[in-house]
Image (cartoon, coloured by chain):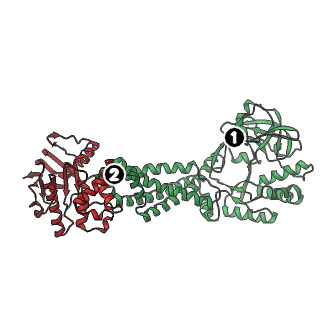
Chain colours: A green, B red
Amino acid sequence: MIKYEITKNLFRYKTLKIMSIITLSLCFFSVNIILSNIFDVSYMDGRQENRIPLKLVDNMDETRTLSIYFTDINRLRDLKLFSNELENAEEFDYCAFYSNYINIAYNQAIPQEMFAFQEHVRGTVYGEDVLGVNAIQVGKTASEFFPLFTADGRYFTDQDFNFNDKYINIILGSSYKDIYKVGDQTKIEYWGKLFDATIVGFLDAKSYIIQHGKSISLSNYIIAPFLDCGDDPIQEDDKVYQGISYTSFINGYAFLKDGYNTTDIISKIDSLCKIYDIPAFAYEGMNTISLGFLNFVLQLGRQELYIFGAVTYFTAFLSFYIIQQFISSRNRENYRIHFLMGARPLAITGYISLDILFQIIAALVGTTFVYSFYIGTIYFNVKLILLVFPMIVITISAVVYRDVVKNYYFKEKK
Amino acid sequence: MITIKHLFKSFKQGKVDFKVLDDLDMTIKEGKMTAIMGRSGAGKTTLLNILCGLCRMDSGEYYFQGKPIDLSTSSKADKFRNQNFGIITQQPSLLNDYTVYENIALPLEYQKIAKKDIEKIVTETAQELSIDEKLEQYPDELSGGQLQRVSIARALCQNPSIILADEPTGSLDSAAEIEIVELFKKLNGLGKTIVIITHSSFIASYCDEVITIKDGKAFT
């Protein structure tokens, strides 16, 4: 009986339910964008208050386009000039930040958590037995924008970012403390080039980065500097290194400067791409449809962002609640009949809550589809799921209380 | 069959306590057809709600078949109602997206009776009330009288001790009213105890007992 009624109930008042699903989807959609930015702002806490980064994602084909920069010196020069333009732009501050594995000389003490891959972790490069481990690559300005604090040793100095054919200084995540100590040396294969690496420090255990909206602890990571290779490559392995390094360097964060907006960043980068013949960029978390909205969000300070998020949430929730009340009031007679015919209040609570739950799931699935289709990078994560939970609880308690408990009686006819 | 003693019930209206039933005593006899009458707002529906456990007394004693009844919790009240009462309302209270068969079977489904038995009970009851040809139809395809017959069939198929009907002919024309009241009389003739809340002296004239509610008290 209960299954039958649930199915019947699902298809009652279709128009109202479609309205409800659309309202909720709009809420999810906008709150997701807002939350992603609030999360990013929190991440910047105490460092770049109120400056929300725009993530640049290159559109280079991994194998075909990259190889041009290894083989054509003029294209590599253009790429370096483009990178300089990013670093010196008037409209934004650029922070090079990338995450790609690095091969480190084999050490049996390195645990599986550090491995970058599930399989083919171990290999041989230039005669060295190596392990592919998690790593991030940072530009000179990264520590100004991201919480990269060292617990032992020191952070990178400007000299650490200068290219040296043989040596490199690296920082390790806190989990490496049991394996290495400050001053130890090892070998790393960093994007096709073998370096003698010196460990200059260990990150604080709480250090983390945000990738695709998720917080990732850096305790199992190697932090390597983006090396500034002003000169043309001489060695064969320098060509590969410089090609990969600069194509990675341009995948970073642009922080708006006062008086400029997201559109300015995008038009600036688009014009630079044309000048230096670089494939047009994508921007994580946005496209032309969401650009206007995101632009507005990016202009807000932290407090305004919270207020705007709360107002959006509250308005959407209120609309959803009102529609639910309307559906419920039309459905009240049905519930009353079920109750009089022997349905337990719990069954009626189940009918109402499942009906609402289906609407929430439909909105969630719909938004996920639209979001991934238009925005590109799906940010749908725990944040959104957490949003759903109070919505279910509040709606159920409100609607059920009103309709089941209060409408228990026959009405006196006047 | 039902004895109520010293029943008090009041509702708050703003800051004022409005006494609806005030030291009411009454008895409903087994196998009889009883009408409960009174002016609008006299407390007839409140009394009906109390009789079937939908509403709690402020104070008073409730005896059912000679035994005191404890309706202090909603689960006890729900169980008591579902076991003993078949309820018929003024509007037939049918689910419009259920067929007549499904509507009649509804209380039996909640009692978790086997499908085969449900089919037998519903078919027999529908035959008894001459609606067996309407079982596959939906409520919006039936006339007012037919709808009320479905509602009565649904109440009957639970085989309740008492049928409680709240203004069962209030929304019907006079031809349908006669048809329904004669049906009640026929059921009463078969031994069913029937309690009808009504404004109509025509219906009351068919009943064995008439209880009038006035000033919160019951007069026979």
Residue denoted by label 1: A218
Q: Is residue A150 visible?
A: no
Query: Please, what secondary structure does the residue beneath circle 1 have?
Result: loop
Q: Secondary structure at mark 2?
A: helix
The circle on residue B116 is: 2
Q: In the picture provided, is A358 more to the left or to the right than A409?
A: right
Nearer to us in this view, B79 or A46: B79
Indicate which label's residue lies in the foreground, 1 or 2: 2
Q: Is residue A216 above or below residue A398?
A: above
The residue lying toward the viewer, choosing from A194 and B96, is B96
Seen at 81% across and 65% down, the residue is: A275
Q: Position of residue A273 (x, y in %)?
A: 77, 63
Question: 10 Å neighbourhood of mark 1: few (<14), some, or many (≥20)?
Answer: many
Report how many numbered discs are placed on residues in the image. Answer: 2
Q: Residue at x 28, y 60 (%)?
A: B93
Residue A161 picture location, percent across and down: 82, 45
Q: Are marks 1 and 2 on the same chain?
A: no
Percent coordinates x, y for residue B94 in the rendering: 30, 60
> How much space separates mark 1 and mark 2, taking CA atoms?
65 Å
Neighbor class of circle 2 (other Cα within 10 Å; few <14, some 14-19, many 20+) is: few
Viewed as shown, does residue A297 lie left or right of A62? left
Residue A139 in view: yes
Q: Amino acid at mark 1?
A: Leu
Quadrant for residue A12, please give it.
Answer: bottom left
Amino acid type of the residue tagged 2 in the rendering: Lys
Given contact means CB atoms under 8 Å apart, are the residues at marks 1 and 2 in contact? no
